[in-house]
Image: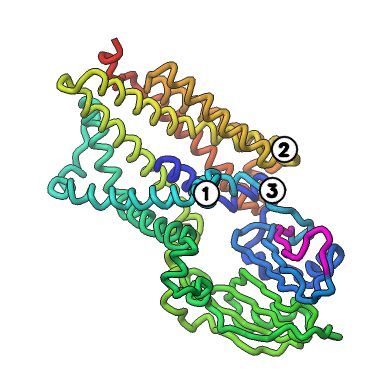
Amino acid sequence: MYVIFFTGSIAFLRDEINAWQRDQPIKENYFNTIDFDQALNNMAEDQELYGRDITFSHRYFERRVTTTFTASKDTSIVDETLGRGGNYFYMDMDSFDKKDYMENYSLGEFFYRLHFFAQLNFFGRSGYLLAGLVAFFFLFAVITGVIVHWKKIVSSFYVFRPKAKWKTIWTDAHVALGMIGLPYQFMFAVTGCYLIIGYTVMLPPVQEYIFENRPEHIEEILSLKEPVNIDFQGERLQNQASINQMVNNTLEKWPDLIIDELNISNYGDKGMYVSITGSPGFDHSLGNKAYRTYLADGSVIAEKSIDQPSGYAAGAFNILRRLHYGDFGGYGLKLVYLVLGFITCFVILSGVHIWLVARNKKNISPYKRKFNFWLVQVYTASCLSLFPVTALSFVVMKLTHQMGGREVLYPVFFYSWLALVIFFLVRRNNYFTNKTCLLIGGLLSLLVPVSNGIITGNWLWIAAGKGYHQIMVVDIFWLLTALTSFAVLLKMKKRSIAPTTILT
C-alpha cells in the first residue's frame, strides 16, 4: 500500500517528469496545433498507409503522441518487417521522429506503471490483479477503521501529545492525519478498484458471462461515438481534404475544445472517414466529450456537441478516471493530491509502528515479539528507502538521458533499493534508518535540479524566464523536498522505538 501511494504521488507529475527528463516542455493545448498532414507524409516514407486505420492519441501531455495503425485492408499490401499485425509507436510531433515503447520508456512511465505493479506482470496481468486486490482491501480497511474508531474519532482528532511516549505520538499523528486524508483515501480506494479490477483486469470469461458472449460490447457501452459503418471500398482516392483543415473546422465550431484523439479509417480509400475527439475545458465539464466525423471530402457525417451530455456509463467512467488522476484542477489540485498522498504514506507507516508497540508486551511470547520486530524492520526499511532511491533515479536518468532507458533505470532503482533495505536490516535501528534516508534523500534531492541545470542549462530561474513550467515544477518539487528533509533532520531527537529487550 505504501508503494502504491508513494509512486502514485510521484506519478501525478508524470507528464512534467517526462518533459523534465527529455527537456521537451510543450504549451497548453499542444495537440490542437499539430501538423497531421506532415505527420502522415512522414509515416508514408516508411510504409504504405493505404487501407489502414490510423490513430493519433494524446493521452499524456507531452510532445510524443501515441500513434497506431492497423494492417492494410488491401490484401495486396504486405509488411515484410511488421507482418499483418499493424504497428504502435510514439511520434515526436515537432521532429516527427518515431520511437517504440522501449525507446520511449521514461521516469514518468516507470513510476506510473509501478503504481499498479505493472513490472510484476510475469503471468498475464498478475501485477494489475495484485494492485487491484490491495486497493480493494484498502477500501475495506478504510471503512472498517471508521466503524471501529467511530465513537472517539472526533475527540481523538483534536488531541496531539508530542512529549508523550512513542505509541501515543504515533497514535495521535495517525488519527489526525488519517482523518484529514480520509476522503482522499476513500476516493482513491473506490476509483482504484474500479479502474483496475472493474475495467483493466476483467478476464475474458467474466466479460463473456456479463456481456452475453459479446465482450466487445464493453467498448460499445463506454464509447462516446455513434457507430459509423463505412466499409473499405478498394478504390484509391484521387483527392482528399486536408486533415489539418478538418481539425481547424472543428476548432472553429468549438473554440474551447481540447482535442486528444484523431482517428482515420480506411486511409486513402474512397471509404475513408476521419473522427476528431476532444473534451471541453475541465471548468466546463469533467466527464463530457465531443467528436466530429468527416468524410474524405471534408463533409461532416456525425457529431456530438460539447454541450451535449454523455451517456451514464461513459460519463461515470470519465469522472472516476479524472478523480483518480487529479488532472482537472491544474497544479493547485496536483499539489493537494501530492500532499495528501504523502500524508497517506505516513498514516500507513505509523499504523505499522502502532501495531508493533501494542504487541511489545510481556504477555506475548518472545518468539512472536521477535517476529513482529523483524517484520516492522522490513516494512520500515523498504518504505523509507524509497525516498533516496527515487531521488537517485532522477539524477542518474538526467545524466544518462541520451542513452539511458529501462535498461539503466531498472538496475539503478531496484538494486539500490534492495541494497539499502539489506543495509538497514543489518543495522536494525529505525532511528538510523529514518535519519539516513532523510540525509541521503535530501542531498540527492538537491542534485536533481543541479543535474538538470548542468545538462540542459535550464536552471530554475532560466526555465521560469522561458515559461518552461513543466521543467520548473519538477525542480521546485525536489528543491522543496530537500529543504523539508533537512528541516526534519534538524528537529529529530533520538528516541528509539525498537523493542530491544526481545533481541537479548
Q: Secondary structure at mark 2?
A: helix
Q: Amino acid at mark 2?
A: Ile
* Residue hosting label 3: 102
Kind of residue at disc 3: Met
Residue 173 or 190: which is nearer the viewer? 190
**Residue under numbered circle 2:** 455
When the figure is inspected, residue 289 is found, relative to residue 357, above or below; the finding is: below
Pick the front one: 27 or 415: 415
- Confirm whether the magenta stretch covers residue 48: no
Determine whether the residue tagged by mark 3 lies in a helix, strand or loop.
helix
Q: Residues within 10 Å of mark 1 (few under 14, many from 20)?
A: many
Pick the front one: 410 or 447: 410
Q: Is residue 419 left or right of residue 238?
A: left
Magenta stretch: includes residue 86: yes
The percent coordinates of residue 303 (x first, y second) are: 59, 85
Distance in Å between CA atoms under marks 3 and 2: 23 Å
Please say if 440 is above or below 106: above
Secondary structure character of the magenta stretch overall = loop
Could you tell me if residue 189 is visible in this image?
yes
Is label 1 in contact with label 2 (beta carbons under 8 Å)?
no
Q: Which residue is mark 1?
A: 11
Residue 44 placement, left or right of 480? right
Magenta segment boundaries in residue numbering: 78-92
Quick one: quadrant of the N terminus?
Answer: top left
Instruction: Indicate which label's residue lies in the foreground, 1 or 3.
Output: 3
The Cα atoms of the two marked residues, 1 and 2, are separated by: 23 Å
First along the sequence among labels 3 and 2: 3
Q: Secondary structure at mark 1?
A: helix
